[in-house]
Image (cartoon, helix red, strand yellow):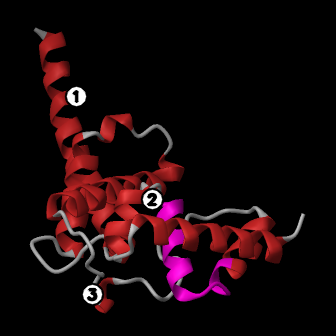
Amino acid sequence: MGEERDAERRLAGDREDGVNVATRWMDEHWDAMVQAARRYAGSGAATPEDIAKEALWAAYERRDRLVDTAGERAWLLAFVRNKGREAVRRRGRRGKRLPVEYVDTEGDATSVECDDPRRERVLEAVRRLPESQQEIVRLMVDGCCDDEIAASTGLKKGTLWVYRHRAIGKLKQMLGP
């Protein structure tokens, strides 16, 4: 009988902890999640807030898989990227560009703290690329496939490959050996 009560208390505590975790995530990470979702939202059903809500819910359902709370923001932003890609696929957007209000032009809103000194050098090199190439590099770093990048940028695949090749070549030239 005592073991059952202990189990019930633990279960009740787990429910309460889940609510507290979701509230804390909203307080600490919501703005970054919405900002990251902007690159996937477009005209149609999915807004950045919708994508962020779906990502938050999916993360909440899988909260037991979060091992290191120090990487919590990166973990949540991975859910945003996945839900954003799903939104792009659902929309079936081909040859349409994202509305300007949803494109992140202020740099790296989805950044994760990193002490590597090369990081800032790479980010500065990316900022010096033409805007179209910057967008392609950002989507590549987010793990989007060619079809998703082409759909997001409104480019044909062949054009995308040329832009990507030129962007990587310029980055290599700027960063050196």
**In the rendered image, which residue does mark 2 sit on?**
73
Residue drawn 51% across the image and 51% down it: 71
Residue drawn 24% across the image and 69% down it: 94
Q: Earlier in the sequence, mark 1 or mark 3?
A: 1
Residue range of the region highlighted in magenta in the rendering: 126-142
Height in image: 81 above or below 69? Answer: below
**Callouts 1 and 3 close, C-beta under 8 Å:** no
Q: Position of residue 24 (x, y in %)?
A: 32, 61
Displayed quadrant of residue 162: bottom right
Amino acid on which disc 1 is placed: Arg
> Label 2 to label 3, Cα distance in Å?
26 Å
Residue drawn 38% across the image and 67% down it: 150
**In the rendered image, which residue does mark 3 sit on?**
99
Residue drawn 28% across the image and 48% down it: 59
> Label 1 to label 3, Cα distance in Å?
48 Å
Q: Position of residue 45 (x, y in %)?
A: 9, 72
Q: Position of residue 170 (x, y in %)?
A: 73, 76
Which-is-in-front pick, marks 2 and 1?
2
Q: Earlier in the sequence, mark 2 or mark 1?
A: 1
Mark 3 neighbour class, 10 Å CA radius: few under 14, some 14 to 19, many 20 or more:
few
**Callouts 2 and 1 close, C-beta under 8 Å:** no
Amino acid on which disc 3 is placed: Pro
**Residue lying farthest top?**
1
Q: Quadrant of the C terminus?
A: bottom right
Does the image show residue 86?
A: yes
Which label number is shown at residue 10? 1
Amino acid on which disc 2 is placed: Arg
Which label number is shown at residue 86? none
Q: Quadrant of the N terminus?
A: top left
Does the image show residue 77?
A: no
Q: Nearer the viewer, residue 75 or 105?
A: 105
Residue at disc 1, secondary structure: helix
